[in-house]
Amino acid sequence: MDWGERDIHVPGICNLRVMNVNSTGSRVCLVISAIACIVLPRFNLAAQDANPAQQRFKVTEITPNVLVFATRTGNVLASVGKDGALLIGTPSEESTEQISNMVASRTQSAFRYVVIWPEDPAHSEADAGWQRRGAFVAIHENALGHMSANSANMMELPKGPQRFAELGVELPRVIFSEVLAFNMNGDAIHVVHQKPGYSDADALVHFHVNKVVYLGEDFPGDGYPLIDETQHGTLTGLLATLEAVEPWVDASMHVVPARGEVTNGAGLQAFHDMIVTVRDRIKGLVKQGQKEEQVIARHPTAEFDARWGLGRVTPDAFVKEVFAAVAQKK
């Protein structure tokens, strides 16, 4: 895989650093039915303004039509071309204008689709302001329920918390249960609901032609995974999702994490193997009758902490997650 960088200037936006990712892997083309719903931008670059109010904005170009935007709230995977733009991930509200401008510089089509991924409801920025720009914005029904202020009342339309109004964002209006499919920009793109891993709204995205995979928080990229029991996440489901993609995610596949740099099948495999190793170690300690505090004191993640222990989930917190999953057989 060949990586390169170059600086470019986008009039009216900023100077940007673009990272190119070229793959020589074979490409597969499937024909799928298209479903409308989702918003997104397209392009690749990285920018940093002197004004601290404006976040550092980085864009990685996988192909001329497939981009990854690194925003404060997470990566956003984009397909941009003659058919418009499709955006997938957890965009921040303040990134929307930058992304919108960059997308407009790459396509003459007015169509914008955005699919919002599950995340911590307390920190979610909902549609990130895309719907007021005319985009179709979609979300899984379970993620919408976790995000809504009145999710317990099935007789009312979902309502967002007060902070959404303060941010100028809204709940997505397009809801899906199992599958979204897009035929656009020369690619066949599937969004497929998975078993509960990080949450019960987890999904897998596969760009069949451009060979790209995105798993959201099931592959955080910057550290150990979070298994959010408040959103019905399970360790078993997380591993099931990772193992489902293993047979066809190889060195030529671009794997986009929730945060951090784009990797490939080897990076995803290493993440899976780490989880399995830690789980098996903790299983053995549980069989010996050791309690949570004793297991934590054994530091079963020690050899992985340098790589995975610097993210949102600390090593001890990850051990607690896995211990609970093993004890509850979840």
Image (tube, helix red, strand yellow):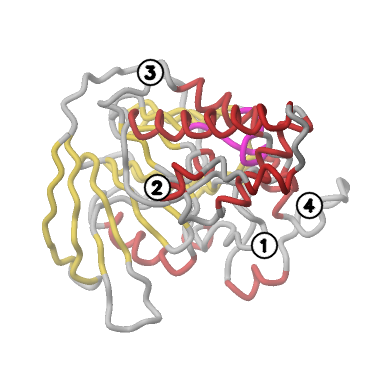
Asked whether disc 1 touches disc 4, contact meaning CB atoms under 8 Å apart, the reply is no
Secondary-structure class at tag 4? loop
Asked whether disc 3 touches disc 2, contact meaning CB atoms under 8 Å apart, the reply is no
The residue where tag 2 is placed is 307
N-term-proximal mark, 3 vs 2? 3
The amino acid on which the numbered mark 3 sits, given as a three-letter code, is Trp
The amino acid on which the numbered mark 1 sits, given as a three-letter code, is Ala
The residue where tag 4 is placed is 157
Dominant secondary structure of the magenta stretch? Answer: loop
Q: Residues within 10 Å of mark 4 (few under 14, many from 20)?
A: few
N-term-proximal mark, 1 vs 3? 1
Quadrant containing the C terminus is top right
Q: Position of residue 46 (x, y in %)?
A: 25, 62
The residue where tag 1 is placed is 122
Residue beneath the point at 46% across and 56% down:
310
The residue where tag 3 is placed is 248
Depth check, mark 3 against mark 2: the one in front is 2
Q: CA distance from mark 2 to mark 1?
A: 27 Å
N-term-proximal mark, 1 vs 4? 1
Secondary-structure class at tag 2? helix
The amino acid on which the numbered mark 2 sits, given as a three-letter code, is Arg
Asked whether disc 2 touches disc 4, contact meaning CB atoms under 8 Å apart, the reply is no
Horizontal side of residue 51 vs 305, given as left or right: left
Q: CA distance from mark 4 to mark 3?
A: 40 Å
